[in-house]
Image: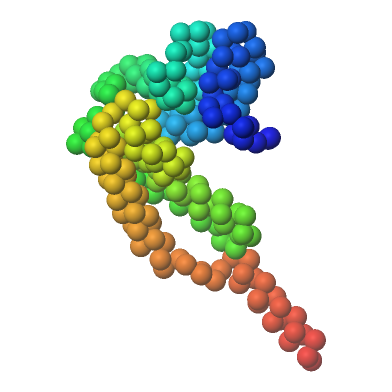
């Protein structure tokens, strides 16, 4: 994808918004491509489901297109879009909660005392040694599982701060929470992730560099073949 972030304009978002407000649909495509990655990650961090996150992002974009005439630039465009995405995600979570007839989700990203935290201990280790790209994919999957296990208020803050590298102020504006809450949730999210990953390492420690499966078969076969040839 082309680099849509580079521009000679001081505020390229303002130009894009003006073009969309004037009826330029191509500019709205540019708007989506410009903010897709960060908004998808916010949706994915909230919903913990790839397909649901994509659907929520699409619905939020439709709402943005229909209401962009009212956008006056009082907040940054990404802040405005992120609130639409977050509202869509939280609405989906509340509807799903009602369908499942469990405790309704609090709409204002409750503090950690009001949230549950559960570790997913699924073991995805393979017996054969993966190549570098497969190893990176496994590490990424592990981190994503552990991040998914965090309460929603901590997941969203962590993704915006540590993944998207938004400032504390930008994160607070996007989520509609105080900056002090951003700091505390980010610190707590990092602590929970470290603790969770440490537990995973302790659990998998005895299995590191395990010599089995195809490794074992390959060495045994090679030695037997060399013995056969030396007769």
171 is higher (above) or lower (below) than 228: above
10 is higher (above) or lower (below) than 186: above
Instruction: Point out residue 14 in the picture as x, y percentages from the top left corner.
Output: 53, 21
The quadrant in which the N terminus is found is top right
* The quarter of the displayed image where residue 207 is located: bottom left
The quadrant in which the C terminus is found is bottom right
Instruction: Point out residue 127 in the picture as x, y percentages from the top left corner.
Output: 56, 61
- Residue in view at x 53 percent, y 52 percent: 138
- Residue in view at x 51 percent, y 56 percent: 125
85 is higher (above) or lower (below) than 167: above
Q: Nearer the viewer, residue 124 or 94?
A: 94
Q: How is the image coloured?
A: rainbow
219 is higher (above) or lower (below) than 191: below
Q: Nearer the viewer, residue 8 or 175?
A: 8
Q: Is residue 39 visible?
A: yes
Instruction: Point out residue 52 in the picture as x, y percentages from the top left corner.
Output: 49, 25
- Residue in view at x 53 percent, y 27 percent: 11
Q: Is residue 66 left or right of residue 26?
A: left
Q: Nearer the viewer, residue 42 or 103?
A: 42
Instruction: Point out residue 67 in the picture as x, y percentages from the top left corner.
Output: 48, 9
Q: Is residue 151 visible?
A: no
């Amino acid at each position: 994808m082309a680099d849509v972030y580079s521009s000679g304009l001081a505020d390229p978002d303002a130009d894009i918004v003006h073009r969309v407000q004037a009826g330029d649909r191509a500019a709205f495509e540019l708007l989506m491509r410009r903010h897709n990655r960060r908004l998808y990650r916010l949706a994915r961090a909230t919903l913990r489901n790839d397909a649901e996150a994509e659907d929520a992002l699409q619905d939020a974009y439709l709402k943005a297109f229909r209401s962009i005439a009212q956008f006056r630039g009082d907040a940054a465009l990404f802040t405005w879009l992120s609130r639409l995405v977050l509202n869509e995600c939280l609405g989906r979570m509340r509807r799903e909660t009602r369908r499942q007839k469990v405790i309704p989700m609090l709409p204002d990203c409750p503090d950690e005392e009001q949230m549950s935290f559960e570790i997913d201990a699924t073991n995805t280790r393979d017996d054969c040694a993966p190549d570098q790209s497969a190893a990176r994919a496994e590490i990424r999957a592990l981190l994503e599982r552990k991040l998914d296990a965090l309460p929603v208020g901590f997941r969203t803050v962590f993704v915006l701060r540590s993944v998207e590298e938004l400032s504390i102020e930008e994160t607070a504006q996007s989520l509609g929470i105080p900056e002090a809450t951003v700091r505390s949730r980010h610190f707590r999210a990092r602590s929970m992730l470290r603790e969770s990953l440490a537990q995973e390492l302790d659990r998998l420690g005895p299995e590191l560099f395990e010599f089995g499966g195809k490794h074992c078969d390959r060495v045994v076969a090679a030695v037997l073949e060399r013995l056969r040839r030396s007769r």
